[in-house]
Image (cartoon, rainbow, N blue to C red):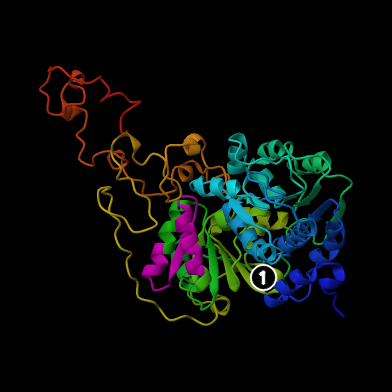
């Protein structure tokens, strides 16, 4: 007979929340860690993506805080969960929120790429649990908006991914601000790249639970490598995309992900893209379309390799083979989650066979290479039932003129003058405060996708300088006469200027 959550010590109100969500019995990593974590001990958990780690730390965190109810204090959270990406932080919040609500606890999510005003307001009102990405959290700590001196429980999720993204120095700086002797829970697939040093420095005599093999635990998936010529590759992608169930296609670059999503949509296969050039609002909107079934295909870069969990993803396609085996593991982990089945296809051109063979060997997989054509039976088997084509409808064209009113929820740069548009992040208007101090290091992109552009709004179609707060018909320096012409665009060459000579200064241009 399967063990129950209640038998493991989970409070009845939390077990009821799980039951109402259709979760009756714990997964192995939950069964292994809950006795230790509910008792307040430090735990190092190692498990594959999709193995149920989120509930493994959410349940004891909420249960222990609820056992010792306290009056909320502005800026002083009682528990902190750190995640490497915005997508993962949002996904964790969806799991924690109903548990916290059932226990009378308040949560908030902190990440970059959006205005910090809402996050600051939440902290000032008082929260029990903060779910955060390290970059923005570090900013708020330095601004004294968040204070960790009264923290009781700390969780570090996907620590190996933190290391891969270069976040460990920031993580250590944050953890140094925590009180000594609190409960730490750390979850990581591997202990390389400095994760082992974090474990030794902060965890006290941790209980180690290694439920799955620390390498690529992808044995619940059916793997294929389709070898096809460059001329037929695009058509093979379209064929693989046209099934009835959800599928994710991974590309190496943001540009190609956007281009492929558009091409599939025009071919009658509703698709959305997910990559580092999208604002947070656009990411949320596209993920919602994918989760609801409005879009059957998500074309993504490695920004979606972790933290994106949508039920019913039947197929993952590596359109561009990943650069290393960890990326293969985490990309592939978007299917066959929580014990379900799934299929993974790597598209390989003849010149890529050597690299793909090495990649699979590092991942601990033996997958035969199958030379296919567009009519191969194995391709049809992977596709399954073909969905009806959906007529493509072009999205409404967005104006680049800041003087025109934008739809609700979009950013507005129409303030003109010096204040316009310089601090718009993630599609939300923002004041001239400290928000522009840092670039968004919390974007969920791989190292090959530096998130600098994303920190400035994440919009691939960023308006030209003239549309960022100044008059869209502002004349160029050449049309304003000599440099002495100052700010008077109509002054004749050589004429005197009434104002300071700022117009052609590179430090003030475009303000």
Q: Is residue 276 magenta?
A: yes
Of residues 510 and 77, which is closer to you in this image? 77
Of residues 424 and 243, which is closer to you in this image? 424
Farthest residue to the left: give it.
492
185 sits left or right of 511 in the view: right
For disc 1, the marked residue is: 336
Residue 230 visible: yes
Locate residue 83, reporting x and y percent: 65, 51
184 sits left or right of 286 in the view: right
Q: Is residue 317 magenta?
A: no
Locate residue 148, reporting x and y percent: 70, 41
Residue at the spot x=73%, y=39% of the render? Answer: 149
Label 1's element? loop
Of residues 374 and 321, which is closer to you in this image? 321
Residue at the spot x=51%, y=77% of the render? Answer: 243
Span colored in magenta: 262-290
Q: In which quadrant is the N terminus drawn?
A: bottom right
Q: In which quadrant is the C terminus drawn?
A: top left
Residue at the spot x=68%, y=53% of the render? Answer: 128
**Where 386 sits versus 432, above or below?**
below
Residue 217 visible: no
């Amino acid at each position: 007979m399967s063990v129950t959550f209640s038998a493991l010590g989970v409070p009845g109100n939390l077990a009821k929340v799980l039951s109402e969500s259709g979760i009756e019995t714990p997964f192995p990593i939950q069964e292994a860690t809950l006795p230790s974590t509910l008792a307040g001990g430090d735990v190092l958990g190692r498990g594959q993506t999709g193995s149920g780690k989120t509930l493994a730390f959410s349940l004891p965190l909420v249960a222990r805080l609820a056992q010792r109810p306290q009056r909320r204090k502005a800026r002083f959270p009682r528990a902190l969960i750190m995640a490497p990406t915005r997508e993962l932080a949002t996904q964790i919040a969806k799991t924690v929120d109903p548990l916290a609500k059932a226990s009378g606890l308040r949560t908030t999510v902190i990440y970059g790429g959006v205005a910090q005003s809402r996050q600051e307001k939440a902290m000032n009102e008082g929260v029990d649990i903060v779910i955060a990405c390290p970059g923005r959290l570090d900013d708020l700590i330095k601004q004294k908006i968040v204070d960790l001196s009264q923290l009781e429980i700390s969780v570090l999720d996907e620590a190996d991914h933190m290391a891969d993204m270069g976040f460990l120095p920031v993580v250590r700086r944050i953890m140094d601000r925590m009180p000594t002797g609190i409960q730490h829970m750390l979850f990581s697939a591997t202990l390389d790249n400095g994760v082992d040093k974090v474990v030794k420095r902060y965890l006290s005599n941790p209980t180690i639970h290694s439920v799955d093999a620390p390498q690529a635990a992808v044995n619940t998936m059916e793997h294929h490598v389709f070898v096809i010529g460059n001329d037929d590759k695009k058509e093979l992608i379209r064929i693989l995309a046209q099934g009835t169930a959800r599928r994710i296609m991974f590309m190496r670059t943001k540009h190609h992900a956007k281009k492929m999503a558009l091409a599939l949509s025009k071919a009658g296969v509703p698709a959305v893209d997910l990559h580092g050039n999208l604002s947070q609002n656009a990411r949320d909107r596209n993920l919602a379309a994918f989760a609801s079934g409005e879009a059957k295909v998500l074309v993504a870069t490695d920004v979606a390799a972790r933290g994106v969990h949508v039920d019913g993803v039947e197929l993952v396609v590596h359109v561009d083979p990943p650069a290393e085996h960890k990326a293969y593991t985490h990309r592939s982990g978007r299917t066959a989650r929580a014990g379900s089945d799934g299929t993974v296809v790597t598209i390989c051109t003849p010149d890529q066979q050597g690299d793909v063979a090495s990649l699979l060997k590092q991942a601990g997989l033996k997958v035969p290479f199958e030379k296919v054509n567009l009519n191969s039976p194995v391709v049809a088997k992977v596709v399954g039932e073909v969905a009806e084509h959906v007529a493509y409808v072009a999205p409404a064209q967005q104006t680049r003129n800041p003087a025109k009113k934008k739809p609700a929820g979009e950013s507005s740069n129409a303030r003109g003058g010096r204040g316009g548009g310089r601090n718009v992040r993630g599609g939300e208007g923002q004041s001239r405060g400290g928000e522009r101090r840092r670039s968004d290091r919390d974007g969920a992109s791989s190292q090959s996708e530096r998130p600098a552009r994303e920190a400035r709004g994440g919009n691939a179609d960023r308006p030209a300088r003239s549309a960022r707060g100044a008059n869209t018909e502002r004349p160029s320096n050449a049309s304003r006469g000599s440099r002495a012409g100052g700010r008077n665009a109509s002054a004749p060459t050589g004429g005197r200027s009434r104002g300071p000579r700022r117009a052609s200064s590179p430090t003030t241009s475009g303000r």
